[in-house]
Amino acid sequence: MDNFTVGVVVFPGSNCDRDVSWALEGCLDIRTKYLWHESSDLSDVDAIVLPGGFSYGDYLRCGAIARFSPLINALDEFVKSGKRVLGICNGFQILTESGFLPGALVANKNLNFICDEVELDIVSSKGGWFNNVDEKRTIKLPIAHGEGRYHCDSDTLKKLLDNELIALRYKNNPNGSSFDIAGITNEKGNVLGLMPHPERACEEIIGGTDGLFTLKSLILK
Amino acid sequence: MDQFTVKVFVRLRPSVLDPAGEATKSASIKLGAEGIKSLRIGKMIEVKIEGNGENEVREKIDLLCDRLFANTVIEDYEYSLEKL
């Protein structure tokens, strides 16, 4: 695993790219490399994080413009090859807009930008993104979003349930998400999108370490 | 080449809650407007575009609406087209 490198994508307007890089390098000793959104060469990286922020100013819809970047175009092959992709917050929005994950993220029910710490139930650990073998099935992670209300139609929800694609549910739904959904995976399990920020929960001194497991699992094959 | 002005209307699907619309409805009632049954907010996108006839332009606009202007998971769209 010495050379394992996680690509951290930087769009104009990304603002959690350095946090993700810090958490991976500083807390987990995992090498990272920033990937500018105009690059389509993913040959140097073994996993990818789409970080939070406001790519392209969230113009039109969150993640709608980012979807057309050369990097996201190249992501299709990367995902098909089974490599792991983690989309956090705006990264989750980009993954739904580009069709890697089903559904969409829309304005919070109460219209507030919510900046808080939330309790989450680990529903499925498809892809090994969460530790659900211990008795600890609840984790605490920070959220910070204005458009984090997960929405999907009833057929999609059924598919998510039947295939165990719902990774995380809010214990106290803060934003009106369908079925309290906070994070989902694709069917293969190698793509995870979630609104909470695991990279902001990697050291006790900043409030908790419940995000470490998810970031560490980027190096799983 | 023919020139067209296209007005695209993008709306949240009826099944999707529109909290901004609800807030605006509430403010409208506070303003004293009576009888408002529903208020929903959408977007209008105006495009000036050229092409060989209306059919070709419609094909382009359909693609733009379906792939970019609207997210059909949550939004519907319609458009009107005017030849200049």
Image (spheres, rainbow, N blue to C red):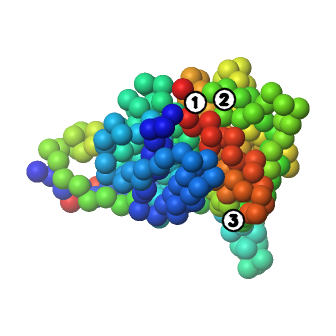
Secondary structure of the residue carrying tag 1 is loop
Camera-near label (3 vs 2) is 2
Q: Quadrant of the C terminus of chain A?
A: top right
**What residue did someone put label 3 on?**
A113
Q: Amino acid at mark 1?
A: Leu
Disc ID at residue A128: 2
Mark toward the start of the polypeptide (1 vs 2): 2
**What residue did someone put label 1 on?**
A220
- Give the residue drawn at x 80%, y 50%: A140
Q: Amino acid at mark 2?
A: Gly
Mark toward the start of the polypeptide (3 vs 2): 3
**Residue A107: image location, x then y, percent:** 65, 56
The answer to which of A25 and A92 lies nearer the viewer is A25
Residue A24, relative to residue B56: is it above or below? below
The answer to which of A117 and B36 lies nearer the viewer is A117
- Residues packed near mark 3 inside 10 Å, few (<14), some (14 to 19) or many (20 plus): some
Horizontal side of A66 relative to A212 (left or right) equals left
Q: Amino acid at mark 3?
A: Phe
Horizontal side of A164 relative to A87 (left or right) equals right
Distance of mark 1 from mark 2, alpha carbons? 8 Å
Distance of mark 1 from mark 3, alpha carbons? 33 Å
Secondary structure of the residue carrying tag 2 is helix
- The answer to whether residue A208 of the structure is visible from this angle is yes
Mark toward the start of the polypeptide (1 vs 3): 3
- Give the residue drawn at x 31%, y 41%: A41
For the residues bearing labels 3 and 2, Cβ distance under 8 angstroms: no
- Give the residue drawn at x 71%, y 20%: A162
Image mark 2: chain: A
Distance of mark 3 from mark 2, alpha carbons? 30 Å
**Residue A64: image location, x then y, percent:** 46, 50
- The answer to whether residue B36 of the structure is visible from this angle is no
For the residues bearing labels 1 and 2, Cβ distance under 8 angstroms: yes
